[in-house]
Image (cartoon, grey):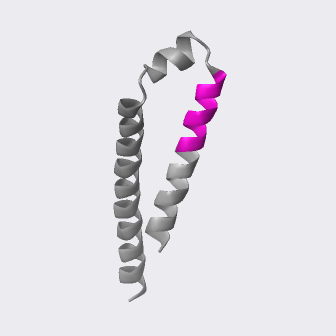
Amino acid sequence: MGNELLLKGIVNSLVYSAIGLVVFVAGFYVLRLILPYDVHKEIEADQNTALGLVIGAFILGLAIIIAAAIHG
């Protein structure tokens, strides 16, 4: 009984992690499509710190939303 419950918890964790990562990556690519400029070029080549902060805030916000949706 205990091992079955542990295995079920591990499988659920792996499934929810995979779903969360897929949603996270999809959200990031949607953001890249929405923005009118190349995010990589702006952050890497042009050293646009403000855009880096915006992208970082977006990543944190999306991660919090996904975690809350998975947690229930």
> Is 28 located above or below residue 11 in the figure?
above
In the rendered image, the residue lying farthest to the top is 45
The residues colored magenta run 49-58
In the rendered image, the residue lying farthest to the front is 36
Q: Could you tell me which residue is drawn at 43 percent across and 29 percent down?
A: 35
Viewer-side residue, 6 vs 20: 20
Viewer-side residue, 17 vs 64: 64
In the rendered image, the residue lying farthest to the bottom is 1
Measured as percent of width and height from the top left, residue 67 is found at 50, 61
Q: In which quarter of the image is residue 43?
A: top right
Per the image, is 62 magenta?
Answer: no
Measured as percent of width and height from the top left, residue 26 is found at 34, 43
| Left or right, residue 32 beside residue 62 | left
Measured as percent of width and height from the top left, residue 61 is found at 56, 50
Magenta region, mostly helix, strand or loop? helix
Q: Could you tell me which residue is drawn at 49 percent across and 71 percent down?
A: 71
Q: In which quarter of the image is residue 20?
A: bottom left
Q: Could you tell me which residue is drawn at 38 percent across and 33 percent down?
A: 34
Query: Quarter of the image containing the N terminus?
Result: bottom left
Q: Could you tell me which residue is drawn at 59 percent across and 37 percent down?
A: 56
> Is 56 located above or below residue 35 in the figure?
below
Viewer-side residue, 48 vs 70: 48
Per the image, is 51 magenta?
Answer: yes
> Is 42 located above or below residue 1 in the figure?
above
Measured as percent of width and height from the top left, residue 69 is found at 45, 66
> Is 64 located above or below residue 34 in the figure?
below
Q: How many marks?
A: 0
